[in-house]
Image: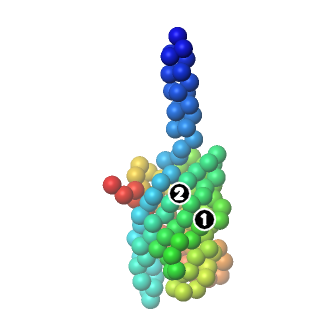
Amino acid sequence: MVKLGVLLIGMFGFAALAAGQSAFDGKWNAQVVRPAPNPTQNLTITLKSDAGKVSGSIVGADPGESPIEWGYIKGDLITFRVKMQIAKVPQTMVYIGKIAGDQIDFGRRPEDLKIGQLVEFTAKKPK
């Protein structure tokens, strides 16, 4: 009887842990084709969710890793903000994405709507 109780507690604990994870959690790779004269940008996006809030980082923008400042998940949608170097200019970028299976279709643009433009790309989980 004690073994059954321990087994049930373990199963419920695992189920609670699994329920806390989101399909967005993990590493994602993306190739961002930017408007000329900017080169293509290879990104690794690491996402972690907790109660609908997003943390993590983006690696690949100059000069390297940029932490996610804030972000939110609602259903199959995600949005977050990152301060990063784009073409050697510091900018705050806003990302908005929609997950479908093992990929996220993103739109990214500078937070300051007077500069830059929307760039769309797809991030995929590595196999």
State the SS at label 2.
strand
Going by the numbered disc 1, the residue's amino acid type is: Ile
Q: Would you call the spot at circle 1 few (<14 residues within 10 Å), some (14-19), or many (20 or more)? A: many
Nearer to me, 61 or 94: 61
Q: Is residue 74 above or below residue 46?
A: above
Which residue is drawn at the image coordinates 58% and 86% (left, top)? 89
For residue 5, what is the image quadrant?
top right
Q: Would you call the spot at circle 2 few (<14 residues within 10 Å), some (14-19), or many (20 or more)? A: some
Counting from the top left corner in percent of width and height, residue 37 is at 44, 89
Q: Are marks 2 and 1 in contact (CB under 8 Å)?
A: yes
Counting from the top left corner in percent of width and height, residue 14 is at 52, 33
Q: Is residue 64 visible?
A: yes
State the SS at label 1.
strand
Q: CA distance from mark 2 to mark 1?
A: 9 Å
Which residue is drawn at the image coordinates 40% and 59% (left, top)? 124
For residue 30, what is the image quadrant?
bottom left
For residue 70, what is the image quadrant?
bottom right
Residue wearing tag 2: 47
Residue wearing tag 1: 68
Counting from the top left corner in percent of width and height, residue 57 is at 55, 65
Q: Is residue 108 above or below residue 105?
A: below
Which residue is drawn at the image coordinates 41% and 64% (left, top)? 29
Q: Residue furthest bottom?
A: 37
**Relative to residue 72, is residue 22 drawn left or right?**
left
Which residue is drawn at the image coordinates 52% and 38% (left, top)? 18
Check the picture and name the quadrant holding the C terminus.
bottom left
N-terminal of the pair, mark 2 or mark 1, is 2
Q: Is residue 44 above or below residue 35?
A: above
